[in-house]
């Protein structure tokens, strides 16, 4: 057996877990199946993570981190909030097309958590929203916190809807087309005089 450091072994098991979860869901993704996909002994799963729950947490962190990595610096550092928002949404939907297994695994974990561990589901959603909000804040540091949060939640809701349609229809071309239309609506709203005035008023009130 080829020697691997504990870090390499963990990374390999996480990648294997993503693939298995994408194929069969969380409940059916046993540690044995994950170990077999990673070509690792079953004991390695328990040695590296201690439990399936800890492995799932590691998988979700990996999915969130790699998802954000798909957002390039140019998109994250866009000069306006509208450009940042549409850039993030576009990059996120491109990653769905380019890494469908990762997306299916994310959906499976969220669905499982909603049914079996609501507190975990809330933590996962809050973490995702927080990370997107941090990205948007870099392009609009003057934006009031409540407007930044509401804008982020709107963007995440659009992303959730687009991903759900992709999951049902499995049509990448339609997903990218619908993303373009969604971005046009987001840009029109965030560039509108009403949105700009609201932002300015709230910034003065802080």
Image (tube, rainbow, N blue to C red):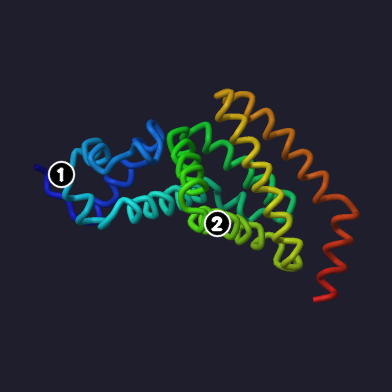
Viewer-proximal residue, 89 or 20?
Answer: 20
Percent x, y for residue 89?
Answer: 64, 43
Q: How many marks?
A: 2
| Residue in the picture at 21% in, 36% down | 36
Q: Which mark is residue 109?
A: none
Q: Are marks 1 and 2 in contact (CB under 8 Å)?
A: no
Query: Is residue 14 shown left or right of residue 181?
Result: left
**Label 2 neighbourhood size at 10 Å, few (<14), some (14-19), many (20+)?**
some
17 horizontally vs 74: left or right: left
User: From what the image shows, is residue 66 above or below residue 136?
Assistant: above
Q: For mark 1, give the secondary structure.
A: loop
Q: Does 158 appear above or below 148? A: above
Judging depth in this view, the residue of 87 and 1 nearest the camera is 1
Residue at image mark 1: 41
> Residue 186 falls in which quadrant of the image?
top right
Quarter placement of the N terminus: top left
Q: Residue furthest left?
A: 1
Residue at (18% x, 42% y) in the render? 40
Residue 149 horizontal side relative to residue 135, left or right: right
Q: Vertically, is 67 above or below 205? A: above
| Residue corresponding to mark 2 | 122
The answer for how far apart the CA atoms under marks 1 and 2 are is 33 Å
Quarter where residue 202 is shown: bottom right
Marks 1, 2: nearer the viewer: 2
Q: Position of residue 140 (x, y in %)?
A: 71, 62
Q: Quadrant of the C terminus?
A: bottom right
Neighbour tally class for label 1: few under 14, some 14-19, many 20 plus, Cα within 10 Å: few
Question: Helix or strand or loop: what does disc 2 sit on?
Answer: helix
């Amino acid at each position: 057996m080829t020697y691997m450091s504990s870090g390499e072994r963990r990374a390999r098991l996480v990648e294997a877990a993503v693939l298995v979860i994408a194929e069969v869901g969380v409940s059916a993704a046993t540690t044995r199946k994950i170990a077999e996909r990673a070509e690792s002994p079953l004991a390695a799963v328990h040695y590296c993570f201690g439990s399936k729950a800890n492995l799932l947490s590691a998988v979700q962190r990996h999915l969130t981190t790699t998802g954000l990595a798909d957002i390039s610096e140019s998109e994250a550092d866009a000069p306006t909030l509208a450009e940042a928002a549409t850039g993030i949404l576009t990059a996120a939907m491109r990653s769905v097309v380019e890494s469908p297994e990762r997306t299916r695994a994310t959906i499976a974990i969220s669905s499982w958590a909603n049914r079996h561990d609501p507190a975990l589901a809330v933590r996962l959603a809050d973490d995702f929203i927080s990370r997107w909000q941090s990205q948007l804040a870099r392009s609009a540091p003057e934006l009031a916190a409540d407007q930044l949060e509401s804008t982020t939640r709107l963007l995440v809701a659009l992303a959730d809807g687009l991903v759900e349609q992709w999951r049902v229809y499995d049509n990448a071309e339609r997903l990218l087309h619908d993303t373009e239309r969604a971005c046009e609506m987001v840009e029109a709203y965030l560039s509108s005089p009403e949105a700009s005035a609201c932002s300015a008023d709230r910034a003065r009130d802080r």
